[in-house]
Image (tube, grey):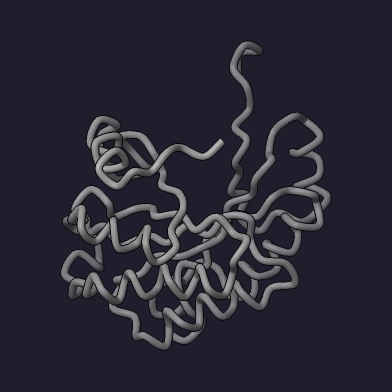
Amino acid sequence: MPPELPLPDVGQGGKADAPRRRRRRGAGGEKRGREPLLHGRGDYGAIITTRAYQDRLDTLGHVRDAGIHVCCGGIVGMGESAEDRIGMIVTLANLPAHPESVPINLLVKVEGTPLAGADALDPIDFVRTIAVARITMPKSVVRLSAGREDMREETQALCFLAGANSIFYGPKLLTTPNPERDRDRRLMGKLGLVPMD
């Protein structure tokens, strides 16, 4: 990487242990470690086959032990039950320290993927997930994340009223589109919301 380009300050290091995370932090890199649970433990094995649920929980501990802020949430709308969504939030809320950032993503259905035909999650159930995250982790930043591109303004407004206090801003997430900046600015203006410092 050319010297004029800074290292990213958010890392997703897989099964990185605490010493490896500390080295990244010491190199001027990671300030926040991203490790999504994806969803509750109950149906996890049907969705994720490359890593065990406990591996993800262990990684969260390594990230925290390395002095890196934890960014951990999940994806809903993958055909999971209400109990799975509750289980994901309960797991996060019962960590030794709540994550500093809790992104709640709505599945973005991508043609040709196994979940492309998944039933749509009722928007009110999505809003409830945001509300439960806010109630159980009052000091965390609850981020309204993936899935906003196709989400109605009214649903996003309800999410903010239910406790979301951040969005991922910009036209593209890792692999899926996100609302254009002007669209987000218009929505924030309509709702009377201002950027966080």
**Going by the image, does 23 lie left or right of 46?**
right
- Image coordinates of residue 76 in percent, x first then y, are 35, 69
Tell me where residue 128 sits by quadrant: bottom left
**Going by the image, does 118 lie left or right of 60?**
left
Tell me where residue 46 sits by quadrant: bottom left
Q: Nearer the viewer, residue 21 or 112?
A: 21
**Residue at coordinates 46% horizontally, 37% vertically from top-left?**
195
Q: Nearer the viewer, residue 58 or 107?
A: 107
- Image coordinates of residue 49 in percent, x first then y, are 46, 71
**Residue at coordinates 78% horizontally, 47% vertically from top-left?**
20
Q: Nearer the viewer, residue 171 or 187?
A: 187
**Residue at coordinates 77% horizontally, 30% vertically from top-left?**
27
**Residue at coordinates 46% horizontally, 53% vertically from top-left?**
165
- Image coordinates of residue 68 in percent, x first then y, are 73, 48
**Going by the image, does 181 lie left or right of 35?**
left
Q: Nearer the viewer, residue 25 or 116?
A: 25
Q: Which residue is most to the front?
A: 192
Q: Which part of the image, by quadrant, shows the C terminus?
A: top right
Count of labels shown? 0
Tell me where residue 163 sits by quadrant: bottom left
- Image coordinates of residue 56 in percent, x first then y, are 61, 67
Does residue 51 sit above or below 27 in this rendering? below
Q: Which part of the image, by quadrant, shows the N terminus?
A: top right
